[in-house]
Image: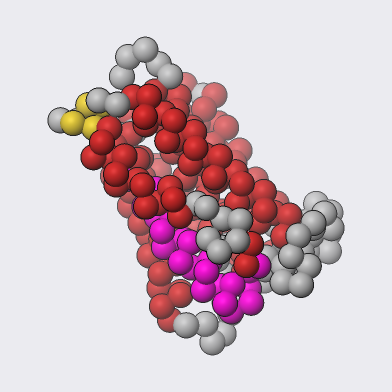
Amino acid sequence: MFAGLPNYLVITFLAAVALTFQFLMSAARVKRWPVIIMSAWLLVSGALAFGDFFADTSGMPPRFILAVAPPFIFIILLLITKKGQGFLESLDIRMLTLLHVVRIPVELSLYWLAAEKLVPGLMTFEGRNFDVISGLTAPVMYFLCFKNGKIIRRKLLLYWNLLCLALLINIVVNAVLSAPFSFQRFAFDQPNIAVLYFPFVWLPAFIVMVVFLSHLVVIGRLQQKTE
């Protein structure tokens, strides 16, 4: 963890992590094994980051791959296995829609991290990151698209999720290409280093993965003929 960071920055970011966890659990009917798996992953990834494991970017592939590959593989397993599909089908897409409000504290955290010279300005809403739109519009979509527990504006919700997924991919690509890896392409004057350390490793290792999964689940559900 970086020394001397403002308390409001750390608290805001940790609140985003906690909210992500809580929203996903609120959407899930089965809670025990998801809580165990997510808690274990937060503990392992956090411990590695706290020990500066990901800070060594000299190797190829970089060690940071171990922060994102496990949850990404887990998402794939959820999508292709029968038990995983059953879990995803049980998720409440109303809660998955509201979940995206976590992108507001995330964007505030990135803005403050840029002020601390820990991420490049292009990763903020003053640069190339428009992801805050997803967070601000999530409650609007919730009230417009649901009534009495049912979807009343399926196409609107689908298009919104597709747009927000595109915004997520945009910032992920920019974040990866701004990191101090051998394939860095942007922000050489101020690389994206915050995510290599605790607790900000939880942004790519946890928050982004949950947000990504929520979009996949809702888009897949909306493309079905019946809800």
Relative vertical location of residue 225 with respect to residue 37 in this rendering, above or below: above
Res 156 visible: yes
Tell me if 151 is positioned left or right of 225 in this view: left
Residue sticking out furthest to the top: 225
Relative vertical location of residue 35 with respect to residue 148 in this rendering, above or below: below
> Picture quarter containing residue 30?
top left
Residue name at image x 65 percent, y 45 percent: 69
Residue name at image x 32 percent, y 14 percent: 226
Tell me if 81 is positioned left or right of 97 in this view: right
Q: Is residue 102 magenta?
A: yes
Quadrant containing the N terminus in the rendered view: bottom right
Its colouring scheme is secondary structure
Relative vertical location of residue 133 with respect to residue 215 in this rendering, above or below: below
Residue sticking out furthest to the left: 148
Indicate the position of residue 216 as horizontal and vertical percent values: 48, 32
Res 46 visible: no
Quadrant containing the C terminus in the rendered view: top left
Q: Which residues are magenta?
A: 98-120
Indicate the position of residue 203 as horizontal and vertical percent values: 53, 58
Residue name at image x 78 percent, y 67 percent: 188
Indicate the position of residue 182 as horizontal and vertical percent values: 84, 58
